[in-house]
Amino acid sequence: MAGSIIDAVAAADDLELVALYNPNREGQVIAGLAIAGDPGTIHVDVVVETAHPNLVFDNLEAWRDSGACAVVGTSGFTPDRLDLLRALWGAASECLVVPNFSVGAVLMMRFAAEATRHFEATEIIERHHATKPDAPSGTALATAMGVSGRGGRSAESSEELVRGARGASVEGVRVHSVRLPGLISQQEVVLSNPGELLSIEHMSTSYDSFAAGALLAIRRVGSLDGGVHLGLDTVLQ
């Protein structure tokens, strides 16, 4: 995903790619820029952060201290991790956590949150590539939080004969994670009433699907109030 965002920023007429950071690839050249290994050397208006969930908080602390706005594409921001980030970041500059840069995925989440008010039960099935480091996906977590915030819940009458068979419960909404080689990103939100079922599904077939949303976040993150915000929906008009 980072490569697609780099290419998109470099090609945009109104944006300038001025620095790259990865301590494991310091000195390598991408898009005409040598990758930096010291965050203290990075001086930019907006940072796009896509590091592994285990590393992202250290990076975000450095970007906060630099005064830059941050667009965070790292997955795995549960409600607890969002609270930790809010405490870390404060309100000095703008930080936008984006579980999914795809505009189609954002609309899927919006439609699901709206629809859940009219259905008795909602569940989420997310499918990603086998090397994805976390489960559930950030998109699934954000979808579940959005559904729960509108009063959506999953049916809870079944007893698990094997632990985990019913998936994870995220604020009362069941999430099922599938990991298979060959996939990029696919999510289905299933809503049901007696006698009817509604399925809202989105699939990314290329990492290029994330580029347009990333550019939108970069351009608009500075217009938000200081502090941590969640979702591309925040800046999608």
Image (cartoon, rainbow, N blue to C red):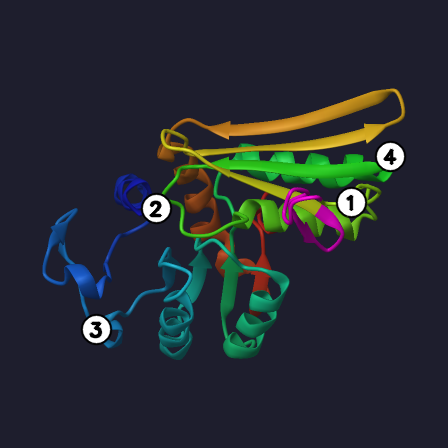
Q: Residue at x 81, y 37 (%)?
A: 121
Q: Sequence order check: which comes first, mark 4 or mark 2?
A: 2
Residue that extends furthest to the right in the rendered view of this protein: 194
Measured Cα–Cα span from mark 3 to mark 1: 51 Å
| Residue at the spot of label 4 | 118
Measured Cα–Cα span from mark 3 to mark 4: 51 Å
| Residue at the spot of label 2 | 14
Amino acid type at mark 3: Asp
**102 sits left or right of 233 in the view:** left
Measured Cα–Cα span from mark 2 to mark 1: 55 Å
**Does dot 1 land on a helix, a strand or a loop?**
loop
Report the span colored magenta. 161-173
Q: Residue at x 45, y 57 (%)?
A: 72
Amino acid type at mark 1: Glu
**Does dot 3 land on a helix, a strand or a loop?**
loop
The percent position of residue 185, horizontal first and vertical second, equals 46, 35
Measured Cα–Cα span from mark 3 to mark 2: 27 Å
Residue 139 lies in magenta, yes or no?
no
Amino acid type at mark 2: Asp
Measured Cα–Cα span from mark 4 to mark 1: 26 Å
Q: Nearer the viewer, mark 3 or mark 1?
A: 1
Magenta span: predominant SS is loop
**Does dot 4 land on a helix, a strand or a loop?**
helix
Q: Nearer the viewer, mark 3 or mark 4?
A: 4
Q: Quadrant of residue 35?
A: bottom left
| Residue at the spot of label 1 | 159
Q: Sequence order check: which comes first, mark 3 or mark 2?
A: 2
Q: Is residue 237 visible?
A: no
